[in-house]
Amino acid sequence: MVFVKVFFGSSESMRELRDGSVHLVVTSPPYYNAPFDFPGLFPSYDEYLDLLKRVGREVYRVLDDGRVACYVTQDVRIDGKLYPIVSDLIRIMRELGFEYQEKIIWRKPEGYIRISRRSGVLLQHPYPMYYYPDNIYEEVVVFKKPGEFDRASVPTDIKEKSKIDVHRFLREKWYLSVWDLTNVLPSEKWSKYTAAFPEELVERLVILYSYVGETVLDPFLGTGTTCFVSKRLGRNCVGYEVDLELRDAIEERLGTNAKSLLHYVGLERQDVVEIVVRSDARNLRTKLREEIEKRLKSKGRN
């Protein structure tokens, strides 16, 4: 039996979770005021970093000793200014007590990138100091909570169920620090108005850093990719999402249609999905969507 719990409310407080009750964190925080994902969501960059710190403190509390938190993120350029999200996130998490363990580059196919107004500046002005490259990668930053994971405590049958397909590991070059993965396009169902990451990215992280039956947490759930993949791989999952307007997308993704508090029993196995709406849930998507549409029209991309 797999349990999935979705809480609509801010992950700045994950009071529903006990200390050390989570075995893996896979998440992608909102990109600071990204023009076509989260325009104007945060009043200032400092307030954005404060949110990462408050959530990070809770992540540290609920994560078991010796286990890891994987953050998918990237620096963001707003009105010509580049904000160093990755380096600031690393600093914040280290200050909270995490060890900086790993960085993986997720590289997107060049075929999905067209010469934009940004990179195209040099074509109009082919001189030095007009160079602004288009970005085709994001970073997966892995943090470890201090302590040692007791591998000997994992039952033999769980080890076997969780065994990594070495042939796939080699064939798809998981052993490299650069992963070539196709991104989720903005026009696709789960990412039209959110910066969703691909299921394959989550799948690799869940397989590499957790065992069957353990619990995966996503404190910025979005449209539910982490819980959907974790459930499919036989892991329990807890997700927090502050935007109540994403509820329909999450419920559809998880194969249920809850209205308040729901327990769903899957046909193939006894999977339980529980959805709870807290008082601090907000309605954000409509406002963000309206702002995104304005920006798209103003750039002639509608």
Image: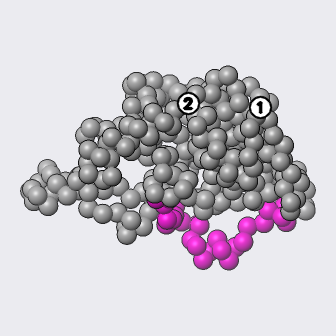
Residue type at the position of mark 2: Asn
Instruction: Determine the secondary structure under disc 2.
Output: loop
**Direction from residue 269 to residue 288 in the image, left or right:** left
Label 2 environment density (alpha carbons within 10 Å; few <14, some 14–19, many ≥20): few
Instruction: Determine the secondary structure under disc 1.
Output: loop
Dot 2 corresponds to which residue? 283
Residue drawn at the location 26% of the way across and 44% of the way down: 298
Q: Earlier in the sequence, mark 2 or mark 1?
A: 1
**Direction from residue 172 to residue 228 in the image, left or right:** right
Dot 1 corresponds to which residue? 17
Residue type at the position of mark 1: Leu
**Direction from residue 270 to residue 196 in the image, left or right:** left
Q: Position of residue 172 (x, y in %)?
A: 58, 73
**Residue 200 position (above or below residue 219):** below
Instruction: Please indicate, yes or no, whether residue 1 appears anywhere in the rendered image.
Output: yes
The circle drawn on residue 275 is: none
Instruction: Please indicate, yes or no, whether residue 95 appears anywhere in the rendered image.
Output: no
Q: Position of residue 286 (x, y in %)?
A: 48, 36
Stretch of the chain drawn in magenta: 159-185
- Indicate yes or no whether the magenta region holds residue 276: no
Q: Nearer the viewer, residue 230 or 283?
A: 283
Marks 2 and 1, Cα distance to the nearest angstrom?
A: 24 Å
Q: Position of residue 212 (x, y in %)?
A: 81, 56
- Indicate yes or no whether the magenta region holds residue 176: yes
Q: Position of residue 228 (x, y in %)?
A: 69, 53
Residue drawn at the location 81% of the way across and 40% of the way down: 262
